[in-house]
Image: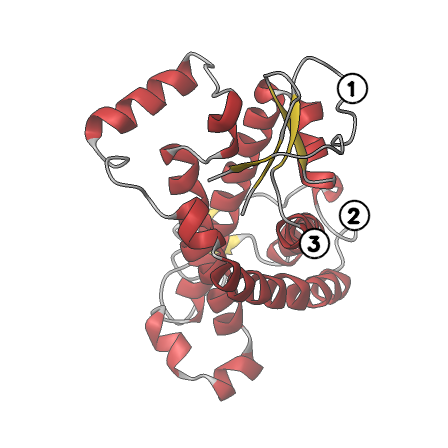
Amino acid sequence: MATIVQSDAPAPSEADPSGTLVKRHRLSTRLWHWINVFALATLFMSGLGIFNAHPRLYWGHYGANFDHAWLVLERFPGWLTLPGHYNLAMSRHWHFFAAPFFAFGLLVYMIWSLINGHFRRDLAFRKGELAPGHIAQDIADHARLRFPTGAEALRYNVLQKGAYNKTLFLLLPVLILTGMTMSPGMNAAFPWLVEIFGGRQSARSIHFIAAWAVVAFFIVHIAMVLLAGPFNELRSMLSGWYRVPGKPTAREERP
């Protein structure tokens, strides 16, 4: 939730009378966001390069050419993979290079978000938000492209909270844990991971599904950014400043 902070010093670009610039995103959130853009793009594209070595998915502990596969695909095109052509060794190098940025970045972000109250303040569901009528209204507003204005634009709605919580606390940890399960070296250190996911091939299948679920989240996220105003949204994630309608007589900041 945002609080109003009166200030004699104008916020950046506050000369534009069409609205007020407010501080929307902390530096920690912005850094993690852009590190994730780099890490997840690299992991996804190199992961498709690795997948191209055997574009079939199985359930259980084992899977090879003559085993029953629940999904069989053609190889993904080179423009969608790293390094841009079929090279399993290079795809693995890219994957293992980006993995620590993603895993440790998520860990640091979660710890810091607990400390500064980001989870409690911005992602926890408030009383009444999970009521069927409230959810239905949010869905209807999104379908009609009715986006919040003023101070409401600084708060996540129930659909955003649901999407972010599912991604942060389910999809991203599952990606990390299934990735560890597929690594023989990690199996030696954490042998219980294989049993949790029902076998290395099951972990590979779940890893693939979770990766595409994150891509689906990314596509919806970009679509919402474009519909809500890409310049304003991009500025808020680069500088932290976001413009809301209203006379620029005060500056709003997240506590």
Q: Which amino acid does label 2 sit on?
A: Gly
What is the x, y in percent for residue 36? Answer: 65, 52
**Disc 1/disc 2 C-alpha distance (Å):** 46 Å
Furthest residue in direction bottom, as rendered = 188
Marks 2 and 3 in Cβ contact (< 8 Å): no
- Number of marks in the image? 3
Q: Quadrant of residue 253?
A: top right
Residue identified by numbered label 1: 15
Task: Report the residue marked by disc 2.
Answer: 84
Residue at screen point 48% across, 19% down: 147
Q: In this view, does 99 lie to the left or right of 193?
A: right
Disc 1 or 2, which lies upstream in sequence? Answer: 1
| Cα–Cα gap, marks 1 and 3 | 32 Å
- First in sequence: mark 2 vs mark 3: 3
> Mark 3 packing: few (<14 Cα in 10 Å), some, or many (20+)?
some
Residue 38 seen in render: yes
Per the image, label 3 sits on a secondary structure element best described as helix
Name the residue type under label 3.
Ile
Tell me the mark number nearer the camera, choosing from 1 and 2: 1
The image's mark for residue 35 is 3
Q: How crowded is mark 1: few (under 14 residues within 10 Å), some or many (20 or more)?
A: few
Residue 242 x/y as whole percent: 65, 30
Q: Comparing marks 2 and 3, which lies closer to the viewer?
A: 3
Residue 217 against residue 82 in the figure, above or below? above
**Front-most of 37 and 151?**
151
